[in-house]
Image (cartoon, grey):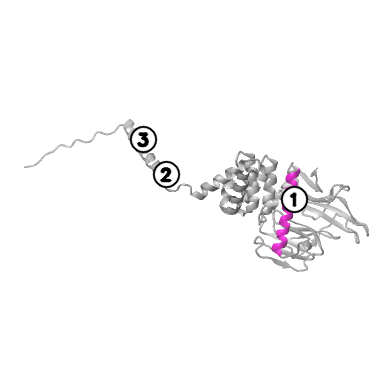
Amino acid sequence: MVNSFSYNPKPKLNVPQKRLVLWSLLAIAIAVLMAVVVLSANANPPNAAEVRITGLVSELKQERLTAQRQAAQQELEALGEQAVPALMVALRSNDAALRRNAADMLSYIASPASTGGLQYALANDTAPTVRRNAAYALGEINSFVQVTELKRAALLDTNAEVRAAAQDALARVQTRVALASKIDERKLDAYAIAPQNTDTVYAASGRNLSVTTDGGATWKTLKDTLPSMTNILAVSPSDSQTLYAGVASLGIFKSVDGGHAWQAVNNGLSVMPGARTIVSAITIDPADSQRVLIATGVMLGTSKVQFVPTGIMSSTNGGTTWTLMHDYKQGEPLTELLFKGSQVYALAGKQVMIYRFN
């Protein structure tokens, strides 16, 4: 006997039904994923230390130094690196008092991990007291990364207290350069940090030039490489091997091999034999390393020596030739110069002057 059967195919789903099935499956998948996330969150709740640190940081919102805030600050300082992430979050809050006090706390901890946040606060925070505390904190960190931002603030910030805090921080950086290079700070004539590679630092003492390329961990001394005592150094923003040095009574010198060999580049400068010509400041345009500015002057007198400024000189060909940019001959010596677009900022004592670069 032959068994017979009939085949009845399952009805096909139409398009709306298919969409309904797909959406149902997607909803189930999302529900499962959310359940996993919730379970994971419950499995890894904030630990007691994190909760404690968050509570301590919240005390920094208080304007006045209350007993609670003082106790919180002492505990945060003791926690050190553990407190840095929460303080970095506070540094970007909407509460100015919290930002100010967070920057202050970071100065006590002095963690390199806080450098980026403090530099951002110094450059962008709307509250001068926050910028001031950020500048101070950057001066406490054992690093050279922050020097460019501190130099910018020392000249460009609109608030005098912030500029002073940045200048003070730079003085502390100089002390660390002396300690790291094992040069008596009284004999550290000048130092410069490569803008594009802050691990490269040059320190001049007498005719010796000490160099580090690993952020100060190790140093190499190039003995008697400088023409004479150097009072100012600058490194090209485009090449950490190209340096300019203001050499006492000899004008401006340039090296293109990291300080091993130097050549005088005084064409256009009034450097006369016997005259005590001084280069008091150097700056190089970060947008065009061939544009260089120097502030010059002469030392006059015998028993009572006085520095007399003679002007700001400019070069558009990397020091090959110089022309007078500004006839600055009065007031205190110019100790800092800085490019900002087509403008040049100059620091004389506490006074900031602005010139247009042509």
Q: Are marks 2 and 3 in contact (CB under 8 Å)?
A: no
In the rendered structure, which amino acid carries the disc numbered 2? Val
Residue under circle 2? 37
Q: Residue at x 62, y 53 (%)?
A: 109
Residue under circle 1? 167
Q: Does the magenta-highlighted stretch encompass residue 74? A: no
The residue lying furthest to the front in this view is 67
Residue 241 visible: no
Tell me which segment is drawn in magenta. Answer: 160-181
Q: Residue at x 66, y 65 (%)?
A: 218
Where residue 150 appears, as percent x and y from the top left, is 71, 50
Is residue 219 found left or right of 358 in the rendered image? Answer: left
Residue under circle 3? 23
Which numbered disc, 1 or 2, marks the residue that appears first in the sequence?
A: 2
Please, what is the dominant secondary structure of the magenta stretch? Answer: helix
Is residue 52 found left or right of 303 in the rendered image? Answer: left
**Element type where label 2 sits in the image:** helix
Is residue 142 found left or right of 230 in the rendered image? Answer: left
Which numbered disc, 2 or 3, marks the residue that appears first in the sequence?
A: 3
Indicate which label's residue lies in the foreground, 3 or 1. Answer: 1
Where residue 83 appears, as percent x and y from the top left, is 57, 50
